[in-house]
Structures are given as structure tokens and as C-alpha cells.
Image (spheres, helix red, strand yellow):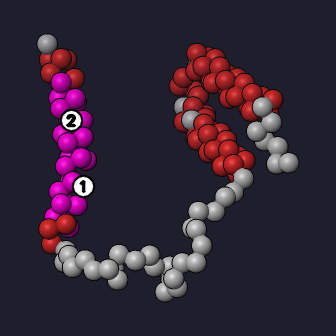
Amino acid sequence: MELLNVYQNNYLIVFVFLCLGVLLPVVALYLGKLLRPSKPSDAKMTTYESGVEPFHDSRVQFNVRYYIFALMFVIFDVETVFLYPWAVAYDKLGVFALIEMLIFVVMLLIGLVYAWKKKVLRWI
């Protein structure tokens, strides 16, 4: 029964932090809205780009491959972060953790081969 209270206490702490994480920004934004001066005018509502009136559309087209390549980099970069704790605690984890990490790395390699076959990593 005492173990159940410990788990409930842990969930209570998580719930309190979740509520604070939502409540504090909402309160701060609301207080900022109440305290700041609000005097809208036509001049304040115009577009302003470094003191120069805008003369063309601000949207710039770029090759979507830059985005895909950056996304692939972030995915594989974040996945390698998971390798560090495993390497540090390898002595304590044993063969089971080795098998799990091999499965993880094989899944990463499958994703890399899939991206390679789809020609995501080509620049031309």
C-alpha cells in the first residue's frame, strides 16, 4: 500500500509541474497585455523592414532539399545522443543492452538506406 502512495506522490509532482508550466506563461502573457500601453494607429499597423518600405513579397522560394537534408541531419544527430548514455553505462547493463543497442543501430541504418534509396541525400 505504501508503494502505491509513492507512485501517486510522483504523479502528483508531475501534475503540479505540468500545471505550473502552463499557468505561468499564460499569467505572464495576460499581465503583459494588461500592463502595456495600447494606442493603435495606421502608422503602427504598416509593414516595417529596417526603415525601408517593402517593395516585393517577403516569401522566398528555396529548394526543399535543403530542408530535407537538415531534417535528416537533426534526426541522426539526435539519435546519436542516445548512444552516449548507453556507452557510459555499458558495464552495468550487460549483453541485453548490447543487443538492444544493436537493434537500435540497425534501425538507424535501415532509415539511412531508405533515405539513400529515395535519393534524399543527393544535391543534384
Say which residue appears at 35% left-offset and 75% top-offset. 45
Question: Taken as a whole, is the magenta stretch helix, strand or loop?
Answer: helix
Q: Which residues are magenta?
A: 8-32
Q: Image check: 89 left or right of 8? A: right
Residue type, numbered disc 2: Phe
Q: Which mark is residue 15?
A: 2
Q: Image check: 79 left or right of 64? A: left
Residue 98 visible to an observer of this rendering:
no
Point out the residue furthest to the bottom here.
51
Q: Image check: 77 left or right of 39? A: right
> Where is residue 105 shown, x and y percent of the image?
68, 27
> Where is residue 107 shown, x and y percent of the image?
67, 24
Q: Which mark is residue 25?
A: 1
Residue 57 visible to an observer of this rendering:
yes
Specify whether residue 18 is painted magenta.
Answer: yes
Residue type, numbered disc 1: Pro
